[in-house]
Structures are given as structure tokens and as C-alpha cells.
Amino acid sequence: MDDTGKGYKIAAASSDGIVVNQHFGHANAFLIYEVKDSEIRRTDEIRTVHPICSGGNHNDEQLIENIRRFQDCKYILVSKIGMRAAAQAEQLGITPMELPGLIEESIRRVMAFEQIQNLFERN
């Protein structure tokens, strides 16, 4: 449960809309979900980005631009994310999580993490 009452957004890297199955650097589309009061709602929004990995090379400028597209999201769910991309996301206050699997199950794991975080913040 989100005790703040404000809710938060989650971006999920998915090629099929069912599972988190994309590496951050290879993904070109992210589905946006909202979590509020223990409810998950998929928005109609799909955010497209330009994949930053090509043949082992990374475009740092595009990496930063892609991450900025998710500044209103608290979490990014991916199957994998590189250390540089994860660090850039965290600098913008976005928590990247490697949680491959069914999107709803992955989001429920984030919600459990959020509950634990909220417990620690109160103490």
C-alpha cells in the first residue's frame, strides 16, 4: 500500500505488454503504470525511446535523454540494466529494478519493496 496517498508511476520495458522482458538499453517502448492505494492501473501511455545499445557501444547522450523521459516515474522495471544507466536513473530519483516476469507480478514485488521502504522511513 502506498501510505502517502499520492501514488507513483512505474515504467515497464516490455515487447508484448505482458512480461517485463527488455534490457533497458535495447528497449524502444515502456508501458506506464500507476500504483495508488494498493491498486495497479495500466495507463494508455506507451513511451518510446531510442535504444542506446548497438553492437556493444553505448550512446551516453541518448542514455541520459532516455532516462529523462521517465522523470515522473518512481521505478523502471527491466529484465536487465547496465551500471551506468542504473546510476543515471538513480541520480534523477528513479529506482531501476531488474524484475523480469509477468508485469503485474513484478509490480507487486515493487509494491512490497515500497512497503518495506516506508516502514524504514517512519523509524
Image (cartoon, grey):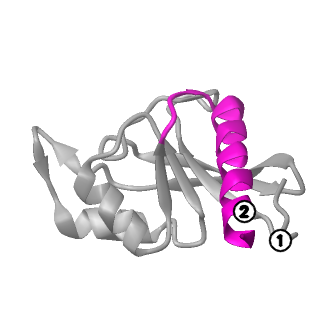
Tell whether position 6 is magenta: no
Quarter of the image that includes the C terminus: bottom right
What is the x, y in percent for residue 28?
A: 41, 46
Q: Earlier in the sequence, mark 2 or mark 1?
A: 1
What is the x, y in percent for residue 31?
A: 61, 47
The magenta segment is: 98-123
Query: Which residue in the protein does label 1 denote?
Result: 4
Q: How far apart are marks 2 and 1 (CA)?
A: 9 Å
Q: What amino acid is labelled 1 in the image?
A: Thr
* Residue 118 tag number: 2
What is the x, y in percent for residue 69?
A: 47, 68
Where, by quadrant of the figure, is residue 47 drawn?
bottom right
Tell whether position 101 is magenta: yes
* Residue 36 tag number: none
In this picture, is 102 found above or below 92? above
Write the residue at 83% across / 71% down.
Answer: 4
In this picture, is 70 found above or below 77? below
Left or right, residue 75 beside residue 55: right
Write the residue at 47% across / 29% down.
Answer: 21
